[in-house]
Amino acid sequence: MINQVGSNNSMRVFRDFKQPQNGYIIVPPPQQQNEKKASGKKIVLYALGAGFGVLALMKGVMSKSFTKVLNKWKVSLEKKLQKDGKLNHFYKFALKKITTFRNRFESINNFTTLKDVALQRLMFGKKGERKFTRRIHEGITRIFDKISRHTVNTSYAKTHQRFAGLNDQMVSLNEQLLRENPNNPRIQEAINQIRTRMSSVNTGLEQGFGTNARNARLQDMNRASEGLFDNFWNASLSDVKNFRSKNMYSSYIAEDYLHPYKTKMLNETTLLAKNSQEGLDEILKLYKEILPEKEYLQIEKQTKKAIKSLKKSINTETNKYFDKYRDLKLGAAPTDVISILGAGGAAAWFVGKSKDKDERISASLKYGIPAVGAIATSLYCSAKLIAGGKALIFGLLSGWVINKIGVVADDIRKQYAFDVSFHNKKAQSDKV
């Protein structure tokens, strides 16, 4: 009896058992999964290394960063020299040495710029006869310049908003004071002076920093840099003997060429800003005599923010953008693009070493595209006139975000492929 029951159950179990048509799903051993992860990390590391390595080589990132440090030391020493002290002799000696060292250190930029001018000469031709490649070079340069110029205009737009808000606040205060003190001649006279001075400040801001004024300075930059490329070419690659000249190792040739124009523009805009600040300082003095302390501190705070915003915009235009404009005139934009190609090439090579199509797609989504995206973001930040260190950080953060998106996209892709495969095979019999 027992044997009979066991026999029937056994036959039923094996008769109804269904086997997946493509066999069993075998989970890869942990070692194989770790190898795939390591392969993905290699793609990221080599792509980032190639991209940022080429970028640093093309742009002389280290020399520019250290030059900023030297400039800060130089400014600090100059401020100390303005005060009479026992250490002035030492400060003068230190300032002279730092200035000399900074100029020589900046000469590194001569060699990083060689790549830019060489590529531009190659794409332009000796007399600009290579029209097709020249248009490509000029098109890339225009894109980078458009991004940089937009940063300048955006900065000034924020500054104008600051001053518009300051004007509104002053109008409101003036109306309040007149309403509360209708028969006070001292307050009425102060407000009349405030209105006159603020009108003068607004006129000066428009004349000095409005759209027409900025466009005029842009034209001055263009005129100043007309002979820049030929000057650098003649001082470097035109003759191998130039590499033995003192100029190649004592300072940055392009910076020296444009220094008088840059200094003139910086001095003019600084003077305009100083005039505006003096006008606002006089207004604050008048307000301090007629306003309660709490309200005075509020208007003083908004005034300082407006001045700070103006100085920041001036620095963005006459310092950061001027340097970017100089680099673009020397052909920097297309060599920046090469860094993206370097990252893409490295990523493509390692992705191509994947075992099959599915693994290549996964590697591209999770590692290849994020690596290239990190380099592209860093370059975009550089075009936006963001400092090199910050641009690098933003680039790495964007790569991390794109990686997370790629992981999700790859999981969805695999799930979709599994579902399609399952439904296509569902109609087939799986019975053994």
Image (tube, rainbow, N blue to C red):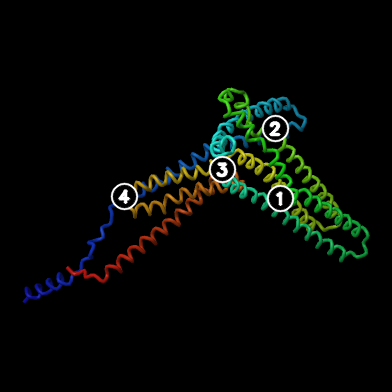
Q: Earlier in the sequence, mark 2 or mark 1?
A: 2
Q: Which residue is tagged 3?
A: 131
**Amino acid, disc 2:** Leu
- On the rendered image, what quadrant is the C terminus found in? bottom left
Q: Earlier in the sequence, mark 3 or mark 1?
A: 3
Residue name at image x 49 percent, y 45 percent? 340
Extreme residue in the front direction: 129
Q: Which residue is mark 4?
A: 355
Position of residue 398 in the picture relative to residue 296 (left or right): left
**Secondary structure under the numbered disc 3 in the rendered image:** helix
Q: Earlier in the sequence, mark 2 or mark 4?
A: 2
Left or right of residue 106: residue 374: left
- Where does residue 1 sit, x and y in percent of width and height? 6, 77
The one of 215 and 139 positioned closer to us in this rendering: 139
- Where residue 189 appears, x then y in whole percent? 91, 57
Q: Quickly name the residue at label 2.
A: 77
Mark 2 neighbour density, 10 Å: few (under 14) some (14–19) many (20 or more): some
Q: Secondary structure at mark 2?
A: helix
- Report how far apart the C-alphas of labels 2 and 4 lie in the structure: 61 Å
Q: Quadrant of residue 417?
A: bottom left
Q: Which residue is mark 1?
A: 309
Neighbourhood count class around disc 4 (C-alpha, 10 Å): few under 14, some 14–19, many 20 upward: few
Q: Is the residue under label 1 in contact with that under label 2 (CB below 8 Å)? A: no
Q: Answer whether labels 3 and 2 touch (C-beta < 8 Å).
A: no
Q: Position of residue 188 (x, y in %)?
A: 90, 60
